[in-house]
Structure formats: C-alpha cells, structure tokens
Image: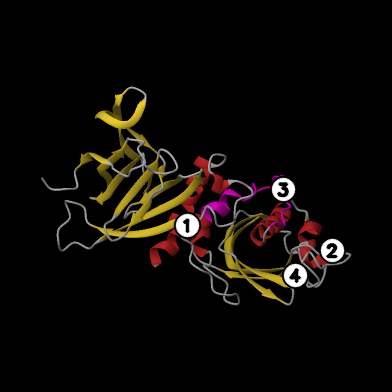
Amino acid sequence: MTRPVSMALALAVAASLAQVAAASADAPYLDDRSDAAALVRSFYNAVNRREYARAWDYFGETKPSKSFEAFAAGYAKTERVDVVTGTVATEGAAGSAVYFVPVAISAVGTDGEAKVFAGCYRARLANPQVQGVPFRPLHLEKGSLKPAEGELADALPESCPDGPPVEPRDAVLERVAATFRAAYAGTCQTLEPDAEPDAAAPEIHEIGFRYSYDGAADEERKARLFRFTCGWGAYNTNEVYYLADDAGEISQLQFAQPELDIRYEDGDDDRTVKSMRIVGYSASDRAVNSFYDPGTRTITTFSKWRGVGDASSSGLYLFRDGRFTLVKYEVDASYDEEINPETVLDFETAP
C-alpha cells in the first residue's frame, strides 16, 4: 500500500503547486471558496498580496489573532508564502460539514530566508439550504502549523490527526479516469451532464502475470484492467478499456478485427453466404457488448448486426505476455433468423 499512497501524495503536491500564486504582492487575485483546499490557497493569496483584511475575513468568529492589527503585523517581515495542500477529509456535524486540510507552507522572509511549516487547517460550512441572513460561506475555523524539516513537498502531512481517516487515493485510477474523460467527453453517453453520477465509474480487474522473459521464481507482476461503459443503442453497448501495466504505465486497448469480403448466393438475398474471406485488418478503440472473464483472462466482444442477433460478429482477446491479443473471431453473416456463426480466425484452438 505504500506505493499508491506515495504516488497519490506526489499527485496532490503537483496539483497544489500548480495553483500556488506567484510569489509577490502583485500575484493574480484568487478568492475561491468552492472547496476547503481552495479556501486555504485563497487565504495565502491574500497574504501574498498584502490584503490582510481579506485574509482575516476567511476566518469565522474565531480569529487567528487577538486583533486584526496583531494579525497583520505578524506578516510584516514575510515576503511571500508558498503553499501546498493534501487530501481533504470531511465529516458532518450538526448540520455542518467540517473539512480537515493538510498543509505545508514555505514562508520567505524579507531577508530572503525560507522556513517550512506543516500542519492542518479546519474549515466549516453550515448547510447553505437552511442558513438565514446574513449568509456565512465556507470559512476557516483554525490553523495549526509547526516548523518542519526538508523540502515543501516532503513536509506535507498525509492527513490531519484530529480529522477522520483519509482513504488512500488511487493515483492510477485518477489518471485513467481523467484520460477517459478528456478523450470521450461529448461522445460517450456516460459522460453527458445528465448521466447518473457513477455512470462513468469503471469496472476494475487486477491481473497477475509474468512476461515471457521472467523466470518461474520471479515475483508475479500485477496489471490492472479498467472497463468504462461509453454508450448504448437499441441492441449494442460499447465500452472503452485501459490497461495499466506493473509499472503503472497506461495504454488504451485497441481491438483488432478482420475486414471481410462477404458474398451471398443470390445477389441481394443475404440469407445464404456463398463466400467469406479476410481482406485486411482494422482496429477500434471501442468494444461492443463486451465483458472480461477473470477465469480465462479474456475479453469477449459480440456485435449484433440487427436486433434479433441472427447476424453478428464476435472476437476473443486473450491476455498474455502483458497485453491483449485477438485469438479468435467468428462471424454470422446470414440474416436467416438462425444463430450459426463461422470461425474466420482461430489461434486459440490447437490444430
């Protein structure tokens, strides 16, 4: 479990660093209360811009100093503050949501010396649907930071000691999901704005394997297969697959399929097939009516050419040596209301 946690932490740090305001008084204005981590970054943005009244106002009734003057004076010798935030934990309490934000900061003084501090901020939002006037937005309740050693990223806590446990982030899943959304937004029904919240959640399988060059005594490797439902029609669904290898590298599966020259006995009468031969190959980034079988480590596709399913094509893709390979393909090209496929490619069955 240590590797996923460290990868998640690295991603969290990278994401936070990307949002750190430029380290000067003229940093771009940031006033974002959309989530607790953004609120913390907005607080330090106000500090960097010397807008101490705004920074003061991010706190609720309990302020960080006895007076505003003392609060502002505390930053008199601070040139800038860089901040990174970690995974936010949440819990409910009496109609409020309480957020625990792991934080690490590098405070650079007017003398150029940088000091690293780490700890947590706690934020609260009372249910907006039941609040009256004046409305109280998401706000900071308190922050507790202590001097820390090392680089900024290394100092970031994984969680807050007074908050609920934080589920380790699945960094590979997050990358795969982001890749899927970027590639298929606007073309997959599961990514439409009105889709069910979990419609784009993938089915995940772990596959143990060894490469052909591995020895029998070598430790088994682990790959992960991600199956996303993309869309559906009258009688076919289509799915998108990604494979993460044992090093966490991601690739999208492409499904090879033969191109066929199909001829019928009597011209336009498509009930009796006269001949069928492979004239080439193509590949598709989507599988049709597909499923993964962990027992055989195969993906099966089944494309209906019409609703009754008497004409169709199906492929069998076997996982071996760290990848999926087409090993069998069957086609039922006769529209005769019978299920009678013919095998046009077979590398699965021994001669």
**Residue depicted at 73% across the width and 77% down the height:** 94
Comes first in the chain, label 3 or label 1: 1
Q: Nearer the viewer, mark 1 or mark 4?
A: 1
Q: Nearer the viewer, mark 3 or mark 4?
A: 4
Pointers 3 and 1 in contact (C-beta within 8 Å):
no
Residue range in magenta is: 13-34
Residue tagged by mark 2? 135
**Residue depicted at 33% across the width and 50% down the height:** 299
Residue tagged by mark 1? 10
Pointers 3 and 4 in contact (C-beta within 8 Å):
no
Residue tagged by mark 3? 25
Q: Nearer the viewer, mark 4 or mark 2?
A: 2
Q: Whole-percent x and y of residue 255?
A: 34, 40
Which quadrant holds the C terminus?
top left
Secondary element at image label 4:
loop
Amino acid identity at mark 1:
Ala
In the image, 191 versus 93, the foreground residue is: 191
Comes first in the chain, label 1 or label 2: 1
- Distance between mark 1 and mark 2 Cα atoms: 37 Å
Pointers 1 and 2 in contact (C-beta within 8 Å):
no
**Residue depicted at 28% across the width and 61% down the height:** 295
Q: Whole-percent x and y of residue 111?
A: 63, 55
Residue tagged by mark 4? 64
Q: Is residue 281 visible?
A: no
- Distance between mark 3 and mark 1 Cα atoms: 28 Å
Q: Whole-percent x and y of residue 124?
A: 72, 69
